[in-house]
Amino acid sequence: MRSYYNQLLMLTPVKTRQPKVVQPLVSREDFPLLRNRPEFVYLDSAATTQKPQVVIDTMVSFYEHEYASVHRGIYDLSAAATERYEAIRQQIALFTGAQSPSEIIFTANATGALNLAAYLLLDHINAGDEIILTVAEHHSNLLPWQRLAQIKGARLVWLTPDAIGCFPLDTFTSRLTSRTKVVAVGHVSNVLGYVAPLKTIVAAAHRVGAQVVVDAAQSGGHLSIDVSDIGADYMAFSGHKTYGPTGTGWLYAKQEHLEDAEPQLVGGGTIKQVTQTNTIWHEVPWRFEAGTPNISGIVGLSAAIAWLQKLGLTNIWKYEQQITQYAMEKLSMVDGLVFYGPLHTQDRAGILSFSLSVGGRRLHSHDIAQIANEHDVAVRGGHHCAQVLLTALGIPDLTRASVGCHTTTADIDRLVMALADVSSVFD
Amino acid sequence: MAVIMSVSVLPTDQLYREQLLDHYRQPRNYGKLLKYNAEATGQNPLCGDVVQVQLQLQDGSITKIGFISQGCVISTAAGSLLSEQMTGCSIADVLELRLTDVEKLLGVRLPLPRIKCGLLFLEAVQAALQ
């Protein structure tokens, strides 16, 4: 693995032509925070996205005029809130291509959705079974499987990204066995930015009788997803990375997996009837939503989804690819900068992780991010919840810049200026 | 000798000034000791900074320190500055050192996300002494 990335060092492209200008897709002014901080360059959308005005306005309006509990009250306000909540479930089902709203379970975030998926798979794993995952998985799509394997005595089978930092399709198919019960894969890697070939993975996994769990945290807000077409058994989505509020996310699960399943979190809202000795579970999906949900969050999420649909995810993806291409061309001209992840700019997410060396010494991402901060440019440093990946790459940390639909070429230029200052500080 | 300033007026914007960069580029007491009677490793799980400290102790004092590390400017400079200050100090005094002492040596108030960087070396030494 290490030698592959040494090869990568030599492959880092050096472009000498001027990158073309890209027209912005959305205005910065649509985002109150960016409007209030005109000089601020936000390049950490992979961590969380900034919120459009309409998302904030919708939540405030809900609290000011329509707020009441859901699934619980008889009075008009509660009935209306419940109807709205369920309409949002339907909206999300349509947005993601699910067969029915009962395949959508609201969770606090993608991490909650992945933990729920692992819980639902408890009965399907036995001692000696295998779970395939990649070393590039975010901790949230790694720890649930690690724990599941420990509890049931199953074996984890690790895949390593290929030489150019993409999902290793051929090693994957060769590691599938009759004992494989789960394949856990990130749709888009939060460090490497590759897009995994989900349909191919699902087809191969299903052939051996394995179920597929997809971490769609980094893809939901960037590219068009049709869960039925992809065919995965479970897909975990993040609300706050999809221009929605914090505390929102959802698990898509095929109906057949939920019908007889027991909930992970139990309590109010999950039952039809409770006695001292017996409980009858509620129908799907309410069975899996214990307690009062993040109602206002989901209302805000709905506004975000509608906003995304108006822009068109295909347009967003196309735009972000152009910005990513611009960024890669500009960043490849920075002396001592090495990318990690696919070097091609087609079908690669706007997630750019890199290391920077000055005077032959590899700088720490904390120092890079700190100096970038002094230029009002927000990038991320550290291990990005991917310690296993960084160990496999043989590096302690990475700096990551990630693109949102509001990112412009001017933002990238500011990043490059900040990196020039980093270089001069350490020269 | 580092200038000791009152913590409340320490700036936060001087992390990358020449003095700290000098300690980053050429950390004092860097390297493994041939002879030592205490050692410890410290790690910052947030970012992958690692430090390995070796100490020579005699009659309740630290007579020599050696450290190797992989880390950012703050953690490396703190190691360099602290190792200079600690050499010749009593174990008891070193065990009393805290974040504010590190900040005084660095000459800068550490922003919240960098505090662990500043404490990495100190905590490793204190662990080795216990």
Image: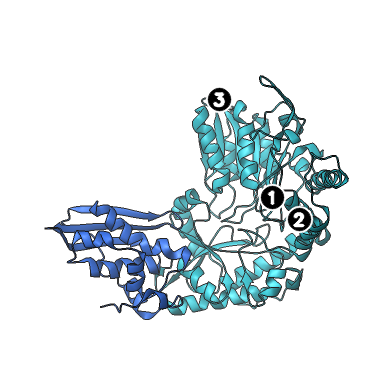
Chain colours: A cyan, B blue
| 3 or 2: tag closer to the N-terminus | 3
> Taking B95 as reference, is B13 above or below it?
below
Q: Quadrant of the C terminus of chain A?
A: bottom left
Q: Residue at x 36, y 76 (%)?
A: B6
Q: Residue at x 51, y 68 (%)?
A: A369
Residue at position x 52%, y 25% from top? A127
Disc 1 is placed on an element classified as: loop
The chain ID associated with circle 2 is A
Q: Judge the density around disc 1: few (<14), some (14-19), many (≥20) Cα neighbours within 10 Å.
A: many
Residue receiving disc 1: A248
Check if mark 2 and mark 1 are on a common chain: yes
> Label 1 amino acid?
Thr
Q: Are marks 3 and 2 in contact (CB under 8 Å)?
A: no
Horizontal and vertical percent position of residue A28: 73, 72
Q: From the viewer's perspective, is A413 left or right of A254?
A: left
The quarter holding residue B77 reads bottom left
User: Which residue carries the number 3 mark?
Assistant: A126
Q: CA distance from mark 3 to mark 1?
A: 32 Å
Which amino acid type is marked by label 2?
Gly
Residue marked by disc 2:
A300
Disc 2, SS: helix
Q: Earlier in the sequence, mark 2 or mark 1?
A: 1
**What SS does tag 3 mark?**
loop
Q: Amino acid at mark 3?
A: Asn
**Direction from residue A373 to residue A346 in the image, left or right:** right
Circles 2 and 1, Cβ within 8 Å, touching? The answer is: yes
Q: Nearer the viewer, mark 3 or mark 1?
A: 1
Compared to A95, does B101 lie above or below? below
